Image: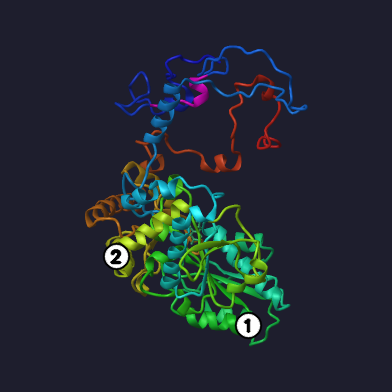
Amino acid sequence: MTVNPSGWRPSSPATEQVTGDTTTGNRALMLEEPLLFEIGDTETTGVDFEDVEASANRLGGLERSRPIGLAGLSEPETVRHYTRLSRQNYAIDLGLFPLGSCTMKHNPRLNEKIARLPGFADIHPLQPVDTVQGALQVINELAEWLLALTGMYGVAMSPKAGAHGELCGLLCIRTALEARGDAREVVLVPESAHGTNPATAAFAGYRVENIPANAAGRVDLEALRKRLGAGGRDNGVAALMITNPNTCGLFEPDMIAISEAVHAAGGFVYCDGANFNAIVGKVRPGDLGIDAMHINLHKTFSTPHGGGGPGSGPVVVSEALSPYGPLPWAARYPDGSYRLVEEEGAAEEHPLGFGRMVAFHGQMGMFTRALAYILSHGADGLRQVAEDAVLNANYVLRSLEDVLDAPFAASGPCMHEALFSDRGFSGGLGTIDLAKALIDEGFHPMTMYFPLVVHGAMLVEPTETESRAALDQFIVAMRSIAERAKAGDQSLKAAPVHAPRRRLDETLAARKPVLTYQHLVPEAADEPTPHEKGDR
Ligand SMILES: *Cc1c(COP(=O)(O)O)cnc(C)c1O
């Protein structure tokens, strides 16, 4: 393959459609970016080592038998490649990111400053405990805040994300049930649940059964009661996994009755706490009868997520589940110093725990950021966060309900996210067309086709950190696209027209992903990758 030495390749198939009338494919100072493999080739490398005399091969037959096929690039070529690509990213630091259920709020720079203090940023998980007392204190203090905010009894800080927290919670529940000789096989999941809930339940070895939603978008309490049976304990239900506020952006007002019904039937209540931003400082999940709940520090407590960083999903648990939680945890001695409760000694202190989920304790960078966020807001500030998040979502809901179908708007205010659907669009247009047109208007699309209980769902979560002016601009864009969709404006089918790439075949990309670049390694080309096997 020939490579243009200066890096760009005029009118390659990928660039053709966006070149407009420039020769290079660049648009002003926004540069068109080829693949890494199109810039470099396997014959050159970015570094220039002299040949060394071969030493004896000590790889015992494990040496590579064919070329690795990586494109060789110089440092400036590499830096430019990734910097150009990064300019094509959209980020919360650039504009509104209304991705429902994801709580894409601003990440305060104060958090970053704290997380970068060398005493936090440069520690190693294998350092002696007496050299990381401050870090353990941070973990412990954050844990105490999470317990205070949720009204729960214990907390496992080690899960690395929301879904990992779900697994931690279900493993606590399973261990508790097994300890009382009552292993059960079913986890109930409402229809509106996030996909991670049934996936976690299945991963933990449970059979998943759905509980329907009622016309108001809430869990159908009667259907739940019916499934649990009349007070007996032979219903097989280990747990209900419920999200509150739920993924329709609505509070479950029957939550206490739901918890009581599950407890009476001998099961536990797991709450998916991803939507905690709507109620932080207002409602304590512990008061609602919840036994376990993960907290996405990267949503509610503003630590960067998505492309921006790792998550962290501490799990708060009730007194009944606390004996079964995982190791390790940070504990305080009476003299005020800290220790990590690990395997050694746990036999006495924590004999019923289900074990260890992670190699090292916690996501230190997320803990420092979350604690900085909590301390800089204070209890009153956190309550204000929830109030403003709900206010912003209702502003969006009421500003758009006359042009977009809003399935549950008639039943009252929403919580932190506004739910719309594509009902009323004409000319074969749907949610995807509105979302793509939103890209042309400079906004990341909302969450699409989720929750599943609403056909053509659009879930908008503005968060509390957007100004009224930003929301108004978003609303103007949404209104104009919605009007076009209702009028059946077929030009929407072509959107996005101003993005670096036009509408892609996302179904094909998901079903038949091509994840390797074949052309540089001729020997490898006729050996299909696992993804290609059977597809071609
Ligand atoms: C984000 C989210 C999760 C999963 O959290 P991760 O940190 O991405 O694993 C689960 N449930 C709901 C409702 C969510 O929004």
Rendered image quadrant of residue 498: top left
Residue 388, label in figure:
2
Please report whichever mark, 1 or 2, sits nearer to the chain's N-terminal start.
1
Given residues 494 and 3, the one toward you in this image is 3
Query: Identity of the amino acid at label 1?
Result: Ala
Q: Secondary structure at mark 2?
A: helix
Looking at the picture, tell me which residue is in the foreground, 99 or 263.
263
Residue 220, numbered circle: none
Query: Toward which corner of the image does residue 401 lie, by quadrant?
Result: bottom left
Mark 1 to mark 2 CA distance (whole Å): 38 Å
Colour theme: rainbow
Image quarter in which the C terminus is found: top right
Q: Which residues are magenta?
A: 32-40
Q: Is residue 196 magenta?
A: no
Identify the residue at image location x=38%, y=54%: 104
429 w.r.t. 353: above or below: above
> Which quarter shows the N terminus?
top right
Q: Quadrant of residue 524?
A: top right
